[in-house]
Amino acid sequence: MLHAFVYNEVAVLVRHWFEVSIHDSHLEHGVRIELRLLAPEPHRGSESAAQKIVADRPVWRADLFDRLDGLPGDFQAAHFHPRFAGVEPSDRHWADEVKAAPWDWLHGRLSDIADVASTAGAPLRDPALETEQVRADAPVIVATAQSRAATKCLSKQQCYAWTRDGEDLVHRMLGQLAQPERLDRDRVSPWLASMR
């Protein structure tokens, strides 16, 4: 399930995510928030026709994750990616404030979306307007993110249902494990069953 907040130049995407470390097979889950740029699309049809919306170019990502072998709600794996190279995120960036006060930190980032985009190397055409509009919706976006936090995902079945549209990516992670013997096969059983 994906929530999209679409503005003039950017879209903020919010979803639950499930991550399998290909290095040591540990499991993470929680909310993923992405900032994407909208691609201009030519008008199609009449003045009443539905228009195409394309939010394809990723700019920034926050992963407010728990480790499944840690304490729920401790945000032990919370990090962010301040920029992308094409579709690939930069390395994980760790910051104490992301783990200590993730929702306040997220609200702060959403309140200055022009700075987030500029720092990522994607300055906006009308930064003041975009910042004003996203800032006005920041409380709603943060509330939506909180509704998809790790502590709201209470079972492996619910986690699978919330990430069903991304199951092929989880399958890719499961197929690349350096230490498959360390995998909690029970916890990932819904994704393993769907590989058959």
Image (cartoon, grey):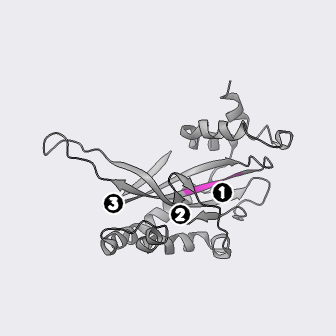
> Identity of the amino acid at label 1?
Thr
Q: Percent x, y for residue 11?
A: 40, 57
Quarter of the view holding residue 152: bottom right
- Which residue is disc 1 drawn over? 151
Question: Which of the 4 image quadrants contains residue 149?
Answer: bottom right
64 left or right, relative to 116? right
Identified at 60% across, 69% down, the residue is 102
Q: Amino acid at mark 3?
A: Tyr
In the image, which residues are magenta?
Answer: 28-32
> How much space separates mark 3 and mark 2, taking CA atoms?
20 Å
Residue drawn at (39%, 69%) of the image: 123
**Quick check: is 50 in the magenta stretch?**
no
SS of the residue under disc 2: loop
Amino acid carrying label 2: it is Arg
Q: Which residue is mark 3?
A: 7
| Residue at mark 2 | 83
* Label 2 vs label 1, nearer the camera: 2
User: 134 and 9: which one is in front?
Assistant: 9
Residue 29 on the magenta segment: yes
